[in-house]
Amino acid sequence: MNAYSFDFCGTRCSAMPSGALYLSEHAVLCVSDLHLGKSERIARRSGVMLPPYEMQETLQKLETDITTTQPRQVICLGDSFDDLDAANSLDEDARLWLTRLQAGKSWVWIEGNHDPGPIDLGGTHRAQMTVGTLIFRHIATTERAEVSGHYHPKHRVAGRSRPAFMLDHQRMIMPAYGAYTGGLNSHAADLRKLFHGPTIAILTGHKAIPVPV
């Protein structure tokens, strides 16, 4: 699956080309910042119409990763929806699709700043959770062995910017998984202040590729 496997704080991890993280020892698949319903939210708040395909594109990518890894648990690491109204206004096809993806799995919605409350879409709602040696939450703190999202990191190589995982010896920030999400450059001050010592970016795309930051 063209993933990049590595050890992070005592847990074996695989960064997938899609931007998902897979923990093989725990059969856990984690995705961050899906921002489902972003086109609907933008239309609702500003009247600007975007092509309404981000929901299908994001859910299809997630279905492919679930089929590939066959996880027992799926963690959605916050900002799964662009706001709570977007979650509550999903059409029937999207709801059924999510129901199919959740079937037979432990499904966890971690709260984000865009979707801070419980949603009526199956699964459980948590502020944070621990898997093995790792702590999963939406926004990074100063805690060691932490996996978070929120910042949508991107890294530029050879003139091209790609969504990327960023990590040092104690913190990992995941790329945004959603189709219509932007990103923050890996050298931006808000990101760099979170990392200490050697830092790598794992580029997403056809193949997950680690590069030094």
Image (spheres, rainbow, N blue to C red):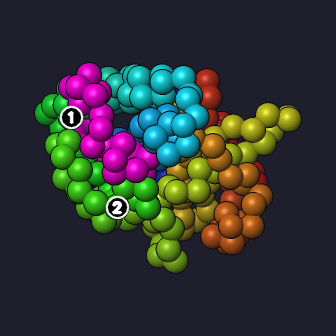
Q: Secondary structure at mark 2?
A: loop
Question: Distance of mark 1 from mark 2, alpha carbons?
Answer: 20 Å
Near mark 2 (Cα within 10 A), the count class, few <14, some 14-19 or many ≥20, is: some
- For the point 75% across and 38% down, which residue is it? 161
Q: Secondary structure at mark 1?
A: helix
Residue type for callout 1 = Gln
Quadrant placement of the C terminus:
bottom right
Q: Is residue 76 magenta?
A: yes
Residue identified by numbered label 1 = 102
Q: Is residue 168 above or below residue 174?
A: below
Q: Nearer the viewer, mark 1 or mark 2?
A: 2
- For the point 30% across and 38% down, which residue is it? 89
Residue type for callout 2 = Pro
From the top left corner, tell me how far across and down residue 170 is, in percent: 54, 68
Q: Is residue 183 above or below residue 67?
A: below
Q: Nearer the viewer, residue 173 or 96?
A: 96
Q: Nearer the viewer, residue 114 or 141?
A: 114
Residue identified by numbered label 2 = 116
From the top left corner, tell me how far across and down residue 127 is, in percent: 30, 65
Q: Is residue 205 above or below residue 138?
A: above
From the top left corner, tell me how far across and down residue 46 is, in percent: 55, 43
Near mark 1 (Cα within 10 A), the count class, few <14, some 14-19 or many ≥20, is: some
Q: Earlier in the sequence, mark 1 or mark 2?
A: 1
Range covered by the magenta-colored residues = 71-97
- For the point 44% across and 46% down, which residue is it? 82
